[in-house]
Image (cartoon, rainbow, N blue to C red):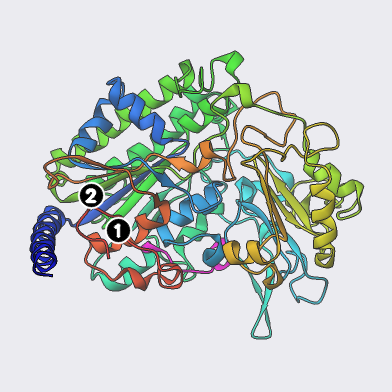
């Protein structure tokens, strides 16, 4: 008994010493970031964790490597279940998954909404919500997207209606998001704070403003699907042309660092939280291997376009950091480099493109209109998203995932049975027969993504085998949107000059943890974010600010 007591006392002493050291380490980490005054959030869309590791190891991204040396690199960061741009960015700026935020895709469905052409909310409910490039006024009546700012206003034909407290009300993107954003919280709780953001769709990304509609003071209205007047071609036609579009965002950030608005024409305080996204890497990844796009092997060896895109983004990071230093702002700015989503498949031996077999199977079995007449796929005018689409039809959104809103939700079990009977890759199969594929529905889906009965959540979600893209397109060999390993495992580096010794964290984290981290850095309570409070999202670890 005496021996046991001796070892017990020794264990207590060792434990106390370890806790003391841990406390000292935590205090040191807290000290590292205590003088931070602003946060710069940068999404390099498509950036995998493996891209970060490879380019730093090969010294092909020297500017990102410098940031990592005074930062924390998270090697096991993932998106919260879906990896489209909407839920991907929402994770970063709300701290929530689609379950609380309500954003599943930029093209989705809501059974509670009325058509844009129904301003009295007297017709049928159930609308195919499309908040993309056509949300700008240039898209009205299917018009050409000729302006970088999307035409300077919303396209009224893209704005559905909802019955709110008995009043039929337009639902703009900022009304569509269900929770607030870091931009709103910071404006509301830091006196004199200014916020800014720039993204790929001029009007579809209005939701970053949050439900108030005013969360972002300087929202750069830039549309990547617009036509460059200098070439009369789209910015998306090649990755090098996309660089020109991304340069608008880089220049906007530099203007803001210099004490101006994003246009550089008006003086303004340097934002407390600001940022933007790069599209160049995503475009290079999607390009076919035959044209130099994508990756060369399963080890993420970049092809020529991907290598060029990573180099471009890294040089842009260098420009931004140099400007921060020039303006004596670098030492008080936390820089977060991550991605909304990755891209799949990077190993092109796994690529399967059998067409949209998922939608065809559902149509063939009458779970959707057998002729594809649902939502905005069937407008009376023939113009996409002009407000004349069909109502109460259900819909399917597919890329490397399938989100299914059935025309009749009571058919969920029958539809699932049909899908499970056709899991193989041979027609009419949906190519979801592997160990990493799954079909979510019922209680399992509701626990993870919310109750479909509330109108927003799909009835069924299909994750096919990694490498499957539900398309016949010959123009792209990679996509994103689902939960395949390659489009959900992302790069994430949090850098700050006060972090004297860079370190790597291997424990699993979610990109939802970025938003509460931003608030912690600025000495605000993360629970001010509705999604953080509902989902219990924690700040990122090993920064001395996690809870």
> Which residue is nearer to you in this view: 73 or 222?
73
Which residue corresponds to mark 2?
334
Indicate left or right for 434 with 35 as reference: right
Locate the C terminus by quadrant.
bottom left
Region rendered in magenta:
172-182
- Cβ atoms under marks 1 and 2 closer than 8 Å: yes
Indicate left or right for 47 with 10 as reference: right
Q: Position of residue 326 (x, y in %)?
A: 14, 38
Residue 148 showing in the rendered view: no
Q: Secondary structure at mark 1?
A: helix
Please report whichever mark, 1 or 2, sits nearer to the chain's N-terminal start: 2
Locate the N terminus by quadrant.
bottom left
> Which residue is nearer to you in this view: 447 or 366?
447
At x 58%, y 37%, the residue is 226
Which residue corresponds to mark 1?
518
Q: Position of residue 531 (x, y in %)?
A: 45, 68
At x 29%, y 34%, the residue is 317
Q: Position of residue 43 (x, y in %)?
A: 40, 43
Q: Badge 1: how crowded within 10 Å, few (<14), some, or many (20+)? A: many
In this view, which residue lies farthest toward the bottom?
A: 166
Q: Badge 2: how crowded within 10 Å, few (<14), some, or many (20+)? A: many
Question: Could you tell me how far apart the alpha carbons at marks 1 and 2 are, in whole angstroms?
Answer: 9 Å
> Which residue is nearer to you in this view: 496 or 409?
409
User: Which quarter of the figure has residue 13?
Assistant: bottom left
């Amino acid at each position: 008994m005496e021996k046991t007591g001796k070892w017990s006392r020794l264990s207590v002493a060792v434990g106390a010493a370890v806790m003391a050291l841990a406390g000292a380490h935590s205090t040191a980490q807290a000290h590292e970031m205590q003088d931070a005054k602003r946060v710069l959030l940068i999404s390099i869309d498509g950036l995998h964790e493996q891209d970060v590791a490879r380019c730093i190891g090969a010294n092909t991204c020297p500017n990102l490597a410098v940031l990592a040396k005074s930062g924390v690199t998270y090697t096991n960061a993932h998106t919260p279940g879906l990896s489209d741009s909407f839920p991907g960015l929402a994770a970063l700026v709300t701290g929530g998954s689609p379950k609380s935020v309500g954003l599943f895709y930029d093209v989705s469905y809501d059974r509670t909404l009325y058509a844009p052409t129904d301003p009295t909310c007297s017709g049928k409910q159930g609308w195919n919500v499309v908040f993309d490039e056509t949300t700008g006024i240039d898209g009205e009546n299917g018009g050409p997207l000729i302006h970088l700012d999307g035409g300077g206003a919303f396209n009224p034909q893209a704005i559905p209606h909802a019955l709110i407290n008995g009043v039929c009300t337009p639902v703009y993107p900022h009304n569509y998001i269900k929770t607030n954003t870091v931009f709103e919280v910071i404006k509301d709780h830091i006196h004199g704070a200014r916020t800014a953001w720039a993204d790929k769709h001029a009007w579809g990304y209005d939701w970053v403003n949050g439900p108030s509609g005013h969360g972002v003071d300087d929202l750069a209205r830039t549309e990547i699907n617009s036509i460059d007047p200098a070439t009369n071609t789209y910015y998306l036609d090649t990755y090098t042309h996309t660089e020109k579009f991304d340069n608008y965002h880089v220049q906007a950030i530099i203007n803001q660092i210099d004490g101006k608005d994003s246009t550089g024409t008006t003086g303004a305080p340097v934002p407390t939280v600001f940022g933007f996204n790069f599209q160049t890497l995503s475009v290079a990844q999607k390009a076919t291997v035959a044209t130099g796009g994508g990756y060369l092997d399963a080890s993420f060896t970049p092809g020529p376009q991907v290598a060029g895109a990573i180099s471009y983004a890294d040089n842009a990071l260098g420009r931004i950091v140099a400007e921060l230093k020039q303006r004596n702002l670098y030492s008080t700015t936390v820089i977060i480099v991550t991605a909304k989503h990755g891209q799949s498949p990077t190993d092109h031996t796994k690529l399967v493109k059998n067409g949209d077999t998922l939608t065809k199977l559902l149509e063939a079995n009458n779970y959707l209109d057998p002729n594809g007449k649902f939502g905005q796929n069937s407008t009376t005018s023939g113009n996409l998203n002009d407000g004349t689409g069909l109502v109460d039809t259900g819909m399917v959104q597919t890329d490397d995932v399938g989100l299914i809103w059935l025309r009749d939700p009571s058919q969920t079990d029958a539809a699932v049975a049909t899908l499970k009977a056709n899991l193989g890759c041979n027609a009419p199969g949906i190519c979801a027969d592997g160990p990493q594929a799954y079909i979510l529905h019922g209680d399992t889906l509701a626990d993870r993504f919310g109750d479909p009965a509330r109108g927003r959540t799909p009835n069924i979600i299909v994750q096919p085998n990694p490498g499957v893209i539900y398309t016949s397109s010959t123009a792209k060999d990679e996509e994103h949107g689902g939960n395949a390993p390659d489009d959900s495992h992302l790069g994430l580096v949090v850098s700050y000059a006060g972090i004297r010794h860079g370190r790597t964290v291997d424990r699993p984290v979610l990109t939802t943890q970025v938003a509460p981290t931003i608030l912690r850095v600025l000495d605000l309570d993360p629970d001010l974010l509705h999604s953080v409070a509902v989902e219990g999202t924690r700040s990122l670890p090993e920064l001395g600010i996690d809870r």
